[in-house]
Image (cartoon, rainbow, N blue to C red):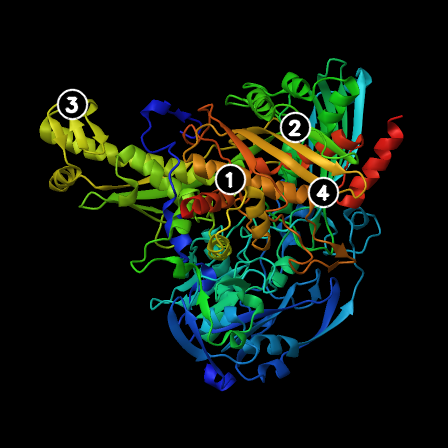
Amino acid sequence: MSDEIRTSKLDELRVVHQPLARHDAAEKIAGSTRFAGDLAYAGMLHARLVRSVVPSARLTRRDVTRAALVPGVVAVLLGEDVPHNEISVDVPGQTIAVGALKARMQILATERVRFHGEPIALVIAEHEDALAEACEAVEVEYDELPVISEPADALAEDAFKIHEGGNLLAEWRIDRGDVDAAFASADVVIEGAYTTQFVDHAYLEPEAGVGWYDDDGVMNLRVATQVVEHYRDVAKILGVPDSKVRVIAPYVGGGFGGKEDMTVEPYLALAVAHTRRPVRMQWTRNESLLARAKRHRNHMTYRTAATNDGTILAQDIEIVSDAGAYAYLSALVLLYSSVHACGPYRLDHARIRATTAYTNNPPTSAFRGFGGMQVVLGYESQIDELARRLRLDPGEVRKRNALRRGDRLPVGQEIITEVQLAETIDAVRERAGEKPAPSGPRKAVGRAIASNMQSYGRLVWLNDSAAAWIGFQMDGSLTVRCGVPDIGGGQASSLAQIASEILAVDMDRITVHFGDSALNPLAGTTTATRQLLMSGNATYEAAVMLRDQLLGAVAASTRDPVESLAMTPEGIAGPGGITAVTAALQICRRGNVPVEALGTFFGPKGKEVTRDLDGERLFPDFTFGTHLADVEVDLDTGEVKVLRYLAAHDVGRAINPLSVEGQIAGAAVQGIGQALLEEIVMQDGVNLTGGFFQYLIPTAMDVPDIEAIVLESGEGLGPFGARGIGEPPIGPPLAAISSAIADAVGARPTTLPITPERVLECVERGARSTP
Amino acid sequence: MSAERTDVSTTLVVNGRPVTRSAGGHVTLLRWLRDEADVLDPKYGCGEGVCGACTVLVDGEPASACIVLAAQCEGSAITTAAGLLDDDGEPSPLQRAFHQHHAAQCGFCTPGMLMCAQAMLADGTTRSRDEIREELHGNLCRCTGYQHIVDAIEDAQGAAR
């Protein structure tokens, strides 16, 4: 039952909802966790990519002769050496002209490169020292082609074609009500244009992995990934059956969407297949910054029509995103932008036009918030301006327009769970108290709130499912097997907590085997804030099945009614006393009752989308929240200090409050980084931000404590009424910070990141507009 | 295989244990530890001394192992996160504080963070939260937003007093 709300009373919970120190942290604090790059095999080879040094060119010559002679080099592979040198991404809901054919890319480029850093050759050597020299020795000659840097230029009629089919990758449209009539009848119209930047995931663990053949001829890839199901893509590239490739995801050193697409997998597989030896590949930070897909740069134009009491009548929105050189997930990211474009507000009239186009910038793809976060800057800047224009309280304007259960989004999807947006607004404001005073004469303090909604769970037409297996050991300890990759959010630990709750086995007697495509039931991707919903529910179902098997067997043996029995930490409690779990397991054995169970959870279903989105349910559900920022602006230098930061979200039910707070704090800081600091800087297709000296993420000194406020409506589609929280807190900082700066200086920043230069422009504009 | 590449050997006292391994003039302390000495808790994060994932203590002082040459450290005592465990393999009070305060999410920055924090505890100064944040500025974390790490260090220095 995919839409069932499996809520529970707090006083019924024993393990779930406890702030338990996570089991995986014991190894992490001892330094003994073996990440993807930490594994070594005797006789292991090393591999590195030769990447394009130009953003747009025909390859006129690729010569590996000299490179192959470098001492220690075992092989140098080109695209011609790849069995199936192409992966294509399906672009759903589009016309035939914008389908999978256009979204294809090569594993190793043979004729044409389209971005700075595109892989051209693969060097495999006995030791790492040989790699740099051999990569240098691969001779590549380029016939340079025009470089397109802006989606608008890419979409011009006479534009140079980056891909054969043209530069338009995807477009989406939403039309609801009569937008023009609503604008004509409005008391007030707010207009604005907002631009977000390319952002890098900047997880601390660069892309890495080790590959080898097992004795049974199966290709094993132990890699830092959010998706073990890429074994299928690797099998296609190698031209072998899916069953001949296994992907293992050890604990991942941060994902944030950047390890959702394949990174090292195809190259490791090629190197292993070619040499029949174990191979390790570790990308440098420079490679990671240059070549792995980024967050989309969005250009967003908003018009909002409202009445004098602050009721939103209509919105007219145009979004153009930069897909970079290859499709990856850009079409879907843009779909998220479209569906989330109006935010957590009710409006009867909306027109949304969204377009994504190829450029010669780095490819863009999944990143925490997945298109649903850039638009927060748009809709929250608009509602903040609306309140300012009407001299109304920004919190009250938001509450007046807030979605409620039963309302429909502009795309037509009905909200089926309780919305506690107003409660999150009240929570941050009550906690924040009075706005602080400036610390000096040339300082200004600003405060703002920003609310948002973000889906959890995959798009419903993707027919999502996840499976988990739970088995009792005969000593009463418990084994959980689930394919879920654990990328640091406590994905594995949460499953143990759920199983512990239902089966009353202590946490330290539960082992979770995760992240393995061959030996564990597949649970799908650790993306889209879906794992608690999906593998959490699968574990819940498996645990309930297993509990019922044990209780049924004991009931048959003791002749007690099954309803009178319950799993407790002491054993199975019934009218006649306690049956130890070990005894119950023996009863199962004698009675041919299995002591294990496989649970499969199927997500909500929906029909496939078309370009014109209408009346459809696209997502399982949404998570709502509100942040509050206090900032101090130095009016002379433009420096912004975040004084206080509060973040409230309704998480339905916190399975582990520590993990929830960790997700909220981490996402908020990542969002503050995007608001103030971070940008992948491109100049004519050349990436100028190739190291952490150039690409600045927040340090401990750049941010205050994030004061997380966790609300629990008990109304989510996950186990125990939980909603997902991995992505939702990353959107609001963009708007909370920019609106707080606007509050401080009287003019609104609209382009990210809000550098001191941009702040000073606002200071000047603000000074001009206030007499 | 390393013998083909270099004929220089370096002896370091790693977590109390003398280790002699080859180290050409170009081999960083990080590569020496990871590839030669099989000490895997210091991590490669950036290779240019910015992110702090490779932080170790060299004779008690925190250093980015990716920008220090192994040969420069000849004879030095190197401490990594694993070296904070006691003889029975039990975590130190600092490590326990990291565990209890949920200071490790993905855990990749954790070994470096711990060494930076250990250096803070070692000088006996009790630091405010702001001062702890200042000391941590050379250790990047992308998961936690830092505050649980600050909580852990604050707690550990309180316990150490």
Is circle 4 on the same chain as circle 2? yes
The reply to whether callout 4 and callout 2 are in contact (CB within 8 Å) is: no
In which chain is the residue bearing label 2? A
In which chain is the residue bearing label 4? A
Q: Where is B141 relative to A174, above or below?
A: below
Q: Nearer the viewer, residue B37 or A221?
A: B37
Q: Amino acid at mark 2?
A: Ile
- Residue picked out by circle 4: A196
Question: How crowded is the residue under tag 3: few (<14 C-alpha within 10 Å), some, or many (20+)?
Answer: some
Question: How crowded is the residue under tag 1: few (<14 C-alpha within 10 Å), some, or many (20+)?
Answer: many
Q: Earlier in the sequence, mark 2 or mark 1?
A: 2
Q: Nearer the viewer, residue A261 or A7?
A: A7
Q: Which is more foreground, mark 2 or mark 3? A: 2
SS state under label 1: helix
Q: Earlier in the sequence, mark 2 or mark 3?
A: 2
Q: Position of residue A23 (x, y in %)?
A: 36, 46
- Residue picked out by circle 1: A663
Question: How crowded is the residue under tag 2: few (<14 C-alpha within 10 Å), some, or many (20+)?
Answer: many
Is circle 2 on the same chain as circle 3? yes
Q: Position of residue A219 (x, y in %)?
A: 42, 64
- Residue picked out by circle 2: A449
- Residue picked out by circle 3: A561
Q: Earlier in the sequence, mark 1 or mark 4?
A: 4
